[in-house]
Every structure is written in structure tokens, then in C-alpha cells.
Image (cartoon, grey):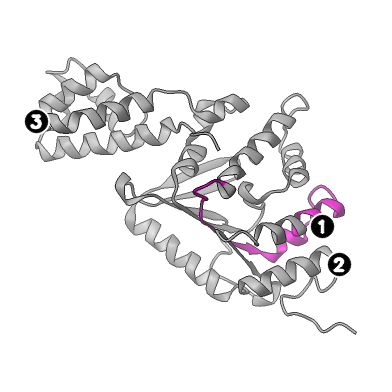
Amino acid sequence: MDERVSPTFKRARLARILRSYRLQARLTLEEVAAPLFTSNRALSRIELGQQGIDPHFLKSMLDLYGVPADRWPDLVDLCLEARKKGWWTDFGVPHAKGTYVSLETEASAVFDFSLGLLPGLLQCPAYARATLIKFGATAATIDRQVEFRLARQERLTADDPLPLHVVIDQLSLLRPIGGERVRIAQCDYLAGMAELPNIKIQILPLDAGEHVGMEGSFTVMRFRPRTDYPDVVYHQFAGSEIFIDSRERTGRFSRLFAELADVALGEHDSVDLLVRMAEHRGVCSGVAQEQP
């Protein structure tokens, strides 16, 4: 897989670093704005990762904060990376919609709980197409959007594959999105993907009853220690989305995921259930059934 540029993540990393340096220098936004000939609002947007900066302005900030010169080259490189075009734009995905993909691209591990739609990283082409049609994709863009979802999945089979652990509510697999043939194809696809060593798929069976994930799907993304970037929780709902990077709140979601994994079927039993669901046998129970 070609190296993919993830500018949104680079900009967010740089934003956190600059805020940290300002706080270490014990400077307020007001005290920084005047000598840099800018506004408090512009500086705030930079520190929130909402606005990019050019290398010259970055150097002025670093000089004002008293950052040692030997740290500048890496930060300038990060600044330049943050100004590039995201790889997803080649598929017609607007920059404003690239935040999740940027994080996914840089993640060192992903933990996903699916209560409704299956995660894009595990959707077969027919399922992806059916969901896109359902949510209003036009005929002119749908092929490209399906290609984009499959391109995202290339991380799962790259030389340095992304570790992915998913817990899927069985109800998501019973709903025939796109029709019964698509449902069967998707179950079969999941069973095949579960054979990859970096992918762990667990099914939360119907007979598990109520569970701690009933409030909605969520994704926890973890990053390499060298990035010094916290875990991020992504939650999508009713045409909107939120990103959470508070360590206290992301820790809570990590614990929720662990609880869900504890009550879900193990990997072997989950694959067995997927195979039976694809064959129309035992689809309403998480317990393996003896066959006559």
C-alpha cells in the first residue's frame, strides 16, 4: 500500500504540541497574539487544530515560546505534512469529512462496537453499496465511494497491518440490508476476514440479553506512543458525529468495550455463528446447535 498522507491528524498533533509549549512558557493567548500580529481567535483555532499555519508563522511561535532550535526541524516537517492534501480527496471525499479517515489512517489499533451498521473496514462491496444507496449516495458517486471503502480496508492487509478488534451485535447481521443475498454475502465476508491474524471478530448474540452497549455504536482509536496522541473515541448518530479525546471519557469507552467483549462469543464461536448465519442455520441464537 502506498504511503498515505494524513494532514488532519498531523495538524491536530501540531496543535497539541503548540498549546503545550505555550503553557510551558506561561503565556496567555493575549500575550502571544500581539507580538505575532494576530488575534486571540486565530490562535485558539490553531490550538484546536481547526486552522493550519505556514512554516514562517510556526517559527515565530516557537521563537516566542523559547523552544530549543534542535526541536524545530521535526515541527516544521510536521507543519508541512499538515498542509498537504489528504489521500481520501482522490475519491471525492471533502476535506471537512476526512477527520475520521485521517485518524483511522494513523491509528495503531482500532476497537469497534457495532450496534447498527457494520464498520466500514469490514463491509463487503455489496453491503457498502446498499448502505450508500440507503443514505442518499447518487448514481454518479456511488462506485467511487465503494472504491473508497475498499481502499480503507487495504490497511488490514498491508505489510504493517492495522490491528482491528470488533464486537458486533448479532441483530446487525440479521437485518437484510440490500436484501437476503447481501446479508449472506456479508456474513461470509466477515468469516473470511476473521482469518486474518490482525483481525478479531466477536459476535454479541441475541441471547446475551441487555448489555452496556445498547446506547449506541462507538469506535476507539489508539495511536503509536511516539505521536504522544491520546486515544480518540468516535461516535456517529443521526447525521452528526462527535470525537472525544478526554482521557477520562476515552478510558470509560475502553472499559465498555472490554465488558462487551467479555459477554460476546469467543472468536471461534463467532466465526461458527457467522458461517451458520450465511447458511440460514441457527441464525437466531448465539449457541451452537446440534444438527440432525
Please identify the residue farthest to the front as the structure is shown.
159
What distance separates the C-alpha of mark 2 from that of mark 3? 66 Å
N-terminal of the pair, mark 2 or mark 1, is 1
Work out whether 191 lies above or below 69. Answer: below
Callout 2 crowding tier (Cα within 10 Å): few <14, some 14–19, many ≥20: few
Helix, strand or loop status at disc 2: loop
Would you say residue 185 sits in the magenta stretch? yes
Q: Quadrant of residue 66?
A: top left
Q: Which disc is residue 184 wearing?
A: 1
Helix, strand or loop status at disc 1: helix
Residue type at mark 2 is: His
Q: Which disc is residue 280 wearing?
A: 2
What residue do we see at 21% from left, 17% from top?
A: 38
Tell me where the magenta segment starts and ends, as one range. Answer: 158-187
Callout 3 crowding tier (Cα within 10 Å): few <14, some 14–19, many ≥20: few
N-terminal of the pair, mark 2 or mark 3, is 3
| Residue 267 percent location from the top left of the image | 62, 70
Q: Is residue 257 left or right of residue 76?
A: right
Dot 3 corresponds to which residue?
A: 66
Q: Are marks 2 and 1 in contact (CB under 8 Å)?
A: yes
| Residue 266 percent location from the top left of the image | 61, 74
Residue type at mark 3 is: Gly
What residue do we see at 52% from left, 29% from top?
A: 87
